[in-house]
Each structure stands twice: as structure tokens, then as C-alpha cells.
Amino acid sequence: MKYTLSRYNRFQPWQNGYHIAYNARSGAVALMTEENYRTYLAIGEKLSGRDTGELNASEQALLDQLAYGKFAFPTEYDELAAIKFTHQLNRFESSSLGLIVAPTMNCNMACTYCFEQNKRGSMPPEVIEALIEFVEKRAPGLRHVDINWYGGEPLLAMAAIEDITQSMLDLAAEHAFTYTSSMISNGYLLTPDIVDRLVDAKVSMVQITLDGPRRVHDERRPLKNGRGSFDRIIENITYAVKKMAIGVRVNIDKQYNEALIAELLAELEAAGLQQRVGIYFGLLEPASEVCANIAENCYNANEFSEVEVQYYRQLLQHGFRILRLPSPVGVYCMAQIVNAFLVDPDGDIYRCFNHVGDKSKIMGNIRNPINYEDPNFRRLFAFDPFEDSMCRECSILPICMGGCPAKRVDRNLIGEELCETWRHNLHSMLDIIAASRQQQQQAAAAAKE
């Protein structure tokens, strides 16, 4: 059988003569010896016909390993067509239902950059009932249902979360589908009692935002009464990590620097969270018109890619795990999936996190049949990365899939403005990821001694 090397391969020199081997289609990351790298180059010469010799035993053995990691594939196989098929399969797959549910848009914080309008009240019983009926009608054909709780601050509507969850679990038992859930929370109300109730509600992961060290976070994310929230959140996290996965998001704009990140990491380390939370640096963007007041403080993707590398290097230097990985995705986000919806407390349905509260972006209501002809469904769903020549030819297409559709439609960005930061910093981030894996292996080996 003849083989071809993947167009999504990347090899780069690393420490002590090693090379980092990465394939964007499989997400495989490995260290390759100099000898194996030379063998890889020899394989490439022979597969391309530039060297007419036969593969020797060591080359054939390495080729078998490359094929396993999708670094190589049979010549008759159309790699791009396979990726496109997987993309379309993910877009139109109907046996999984993804819901982002905002049981309230009320919040206990007054973040300086928040785009959401201040609203009160939780999802009323009639909307909860309609949401459950929405799932129940689809239940016979479902294999999996996932809910991500959102807001506002979803923990202000804990009763609604528990009511909906119980109904989902009952439907899962009746129709034999699996059920999972996660949450985006500011963490202030994530007390031990609430954590235990969330575990019972099958919430396995919570993302919490910490905007820098205590002194910065308390200024940017104060409670509505003006008091700080950092200490309480840290206290809550130290219990929550014993029961569920906790991801810490740090929203980055031009006001941040390495000193502030170092200060935050020192506070997390002092709380015993160094190896117990995953930290993710998020690009703060003017995602809607109401965010225009923060635009001048925001990085573009290219600028952010540089500071992102600096901050992840700091994580590595301070012994934190690096969880950001260049992994393949079937689609970029829910906007490209026919069976994924964001539901607000009124039952209104949206296609993007950033649209919640903007009633002009509603595509329908949970009480009514889904209208896939609605312009607010089609405007984001219509984008196909395989019809964009830059995306189609990109060497990291599988980990980006064309990027955020809303950037194209809402913000009219073009070209590399649409690209994920991987396009700009993949080389540096792979170096950091390899070093992190080595660091974790060394720590695990030391723990066994």
C-alpha cells in the first residue's frame, strides 16, 4: 500500500536534539529523536518519488507509527475530503443535543466590561416546562444531551437548575441517553453546599473568571455592593476542586502585564491550587456594540498571540499545568451545529453567547418549533470554511475550522483577523506544551520515588 504524508504535519527542533512532531488533524504531539527525524525525512523522499529506493525495515516501522497518528495515510485517501465529511457530520448530527441554558440573566457582580444588560428574575415555571418538553419530544432519537449553565450568574437560579436537571435525568433513564453538564460561573456563590448540590446535578466542570490578582480582580469584578470577591472565590475553589474540574479563565486586555500574572499565580500557589486548576487566558474582545467602550484596550488576535505565549511560559515556570492544546475540532462553535441552542430565561433562542439579551438576534422561542429558515439561524450557520480558499489551504484548518462565524458576520473582520491565535504562535506554544508534558512526567516519576 502506498502512503502520503499529511499536509497537517509540523516538525520543529526542540531540546537536546529532539524534534516536536505535531499533526493538526489528529492533535498528536510527540517527541522525535534526531535519528527518527532523519528517518522521517528519508520516508518523505521515498514516498514523493524523489528517492526511488524501497523503504527499509526501520523506515517501514516508523511509517506504521506515523499512519497510526495520522501523520501519513494511504495515497488513495482524500485527507481534505475526510475532514470536510467530519465537519458536515458534526454540523448535522442529530443524536446529540447541546443546550446552553441561562436560567437567569441577573448577576451579583458589576464587572466593568460586561456586555449583558442587568436583568432580574429566574426562568419561570412555564419556560422550564417548555424546555423540558423541547427535550422530551427529541428524546427518542437522542444518544446524548449536554447542558452548559450560563448567565448572568446561573447560581442565582439554583432551584431552576435542579428542577431542569431532575427532568433531564428522568428522561435519560426513560430513553437511554447519557446526560452531562458544566457551568460558567463567577464563583462567588460556589460554596461547599452548592458544590455538593451541583455534583448531584451532574455538573462535572465549572469555569470561573479571575481577572488578575486580588487587587485587580476586586477592582474589575466587584460585587454590586462594591465589595471585593476574590478571597471568597478562592476559598470556594479550594473546596470545589475536590469534587469537580475547575477551569480558571483570565480575561486579558492591554492593562495586563507579566508582573500582574506572576502576582496572580503566586496567590493561587499560596492557596494550594498550583496543580489543581487549569488556567486559560481569554482574549477580551469588543464582541458587540455595547462593548465599544472597551475596544481601545483590546488586543487583536495577532497581538494577543504574543502575550499569550509570554503568559503560558509563566505558567510553565511556576509549575502550573498547561491545558491549552491545539486539538482538532469538528466545528468551531454551536453556531455551526443544527442541534445546539442557547436558551435565555424568557425561552428565547440564540446562536451565540455574545447575542444574549439582544432581542434582534433571537431565532425563535423554546415554546415553538425550530425554524431553520430564520435569518438569525442562517446568518451564522451559513459559513463553510471549505468555501474559503484561505481556510481550505491552511495547515491548521482542523484546529480552527474557519474561526468564529460572528466575527465575519457581526464585526466584518477579514483575512487573518479571523484566525485563531494558533496561526501566529503555534511554534512557540508547541514548545511550551512539550516542556509542560516533560515537567509533569518528571513530577510523576519523583512522586513514585
Image (cartoon, rainbow, N blue to C red):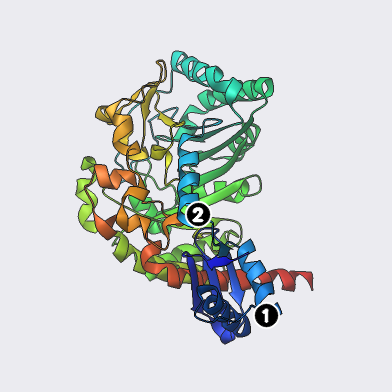
Which residue is depicted at the point 35% across and 56% down?
391
- Residue 365 in the image, given as x and y percentages of width and height: 37, 20
57 on left or right of 307: right
According to the image, label 1 marks what residue?
A: 56
Q: Nearer the viewer, residue 114 or 2?
A: 2
Foreground: 293 or 56?
Answer: 56
Q: Is 235 in front, or is 33?
A: 33
Whether residue 32 is visible to the viewer of this picture, yes or no, is: yes
Q: Is residue 57 above or below residue 135?
A: below
Is 166 located above or below residue 269 in the figure? above
Which circle marks residue 388 in the picture?
Answer: none
Q: What secondary structure is marked by label 2?
A: loop
Q: Amino acid at mark 2?
A: Pro
Mark 1: amino acid: Asn
Q: Is residue 289 left or right of residue 53?
A: left
Q: Furthest-right residue in view?
A: 449
Say the numbered circle drawn on residue 328.
2
Tag 1's secondary structure? loop
Which image quadrant for residue 406?
top left
Task: Say which of 349 and 299 sits in front.
Answer: 349
> Dividing the image into 4 quarters, which one contains the C terminus?
bottom right
